[in-house]
Image (tube, helix red, strand yellow):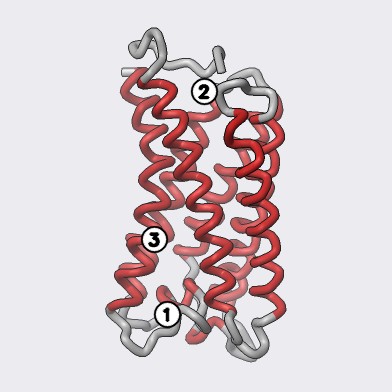
């Protein structure tokens, strides 16, 4: 049972980015007028839109739960390591924030002059989620340097944190004009999602090639 739960947690880290990308692309395809260049991802789940239900409950909420499951997996396999615990908790915080963003949809256009309570909560959750995942990548990037079998991911992970942070800033700066806002947000989210997928896939590969596949452990990394 423990082995199955560990594998499920690891698999969650690989499924979350794929489900997130799939939800964005599918919902975008259902709305020909939607602009991935100008509009926020959240606008696919804006209140009263044709894709609200799908994006909220097939995009935001389930991927948030998957992030939390992957974080729980990391807490188990890296137990007792403070930096890893912090990194895992930041991923869990991102998951919780994404769930909250799904539970509280943004207003039409996500930019009404007098935003509703749902809009304010959604914006807060989205901000916390992005910052938490960027911070998680930064923490794991430095931690990987001390892990022989994960060291190959260190530079890539730190670069991802930096790139994602830059695009988050550009997203905020361009909000007033919406010139490239959606593109910048997707580049930030995409970079972080790809990193999570690579991280989870690397752990899956290490487990599959461990000496004792029946007892997954990262202690030897």
| Residue for badge 2 | 76
17 relative position to 84: left or right: left
**Residue 169 picture quarter:** bottom right
Q: Is residue 13 above or below residue 103?
A: above
Q: Position of residue 164 (x, y in %)?
A: 63, 59
Marks 3 and 1 in Cβ contact (< 8 Å) = no
For the C terminus, the image quarter is top right
Residue occupying the point 55% across, 43% down:
92
The residue mark sitting in front, 2 or 1, is: 2
Instruction: Kindly report the distance in space between the C-alpha atoms of the residues bearing marks 3 and 1.
Output: 21 Å
Could you classify mark 2 by the number of other residues whose Cα lies within 10 Å: few (under 14), some (14-19), or many (20 or more)?
some
Residue occupying the point 40% across, 33% down:
9
First reached walking from the N terminus: tag 3 or tag 1: 3
| Residue for badge 1 | 47
Could you classify mark 1 by the number of other residues whose Cα lies within 10 Å: few (under 14), some (14-19), or many (20 or more)?
many
Q: Position of residue 48 (x, y in %)?
A: 37, 83
Q: Position of residue 67 (x, y in %)?
A: 47, 45
Q: Position of residue 185 (x, y in %)?
A: 56, 69
Q: How many numbered circles does the render carry?
A: 3
Name the element at disc 1.
loop
Name the element at disc 3.
helix
Residue occupying the point 41% across, 56% down:
61
For the N terminus, the image quarter is top left
Marks 2 and 1 in Cβ contact (< 8 Å) = no
First reached walking from the N terminus: tag 3 or tag 2: 3
Instruction: Kindly report the distance in space between the C-alpha atoms of the residues bearing marks 3 and 2.
Output: 27 Å
- Foreground: 150 or 113? 150
- Foreground: 120 or 55? 55
The residue mark sitting in front, 3 or 2, is: 3
Residue occupying the point 64% across, 65% down:
124
| Residue for badge 3 | 21
């Amino acid at each position: 049972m423990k082995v199955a739960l560990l594998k499920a947690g690891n698999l969650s880290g690989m499924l979350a980015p794929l489900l997130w990308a799939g939800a964005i692309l599918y919902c975008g395809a259902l709305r020909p007028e939607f602009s991935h260049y100008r509009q926020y991802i959240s606008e696919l789940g804006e209140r009263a839109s044709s894709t609200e239900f799908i994006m909220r409950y097939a995009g935001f909420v389930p991927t948030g739960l998957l992030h939390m499951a992957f974080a729980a997996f990391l807490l188990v396999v890296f137990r007792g390591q403070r930096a890893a615990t912090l990194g895992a908790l930041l991923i869990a915080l991102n998951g919780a924030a994404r769930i909250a963003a799904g539970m509280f949809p943004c207003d039409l256009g996500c930019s009404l002059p007098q935003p509703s309570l749902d809009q304010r909560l959604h914006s807060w959750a989205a901000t916390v989620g992005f910052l938490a995942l960027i911070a998680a990548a930064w923490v794991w990037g430095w931690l990987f340097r001390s892990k022989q079998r994960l060291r190959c991911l260190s530079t890539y992970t730190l670069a991802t944190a930096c790139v994602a942070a830059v695009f988050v800033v550009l997203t905020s700066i361009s909000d007033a004009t919406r010139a490239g806002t959606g593109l910048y947000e997707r580049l930030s989210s995409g970079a972080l999602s790809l990193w999570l997928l690579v991280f989870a896939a690397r752990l899956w590969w290490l487990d599959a090639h461990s000496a004792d596949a029946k007892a997954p452990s990262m202690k030897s990394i």
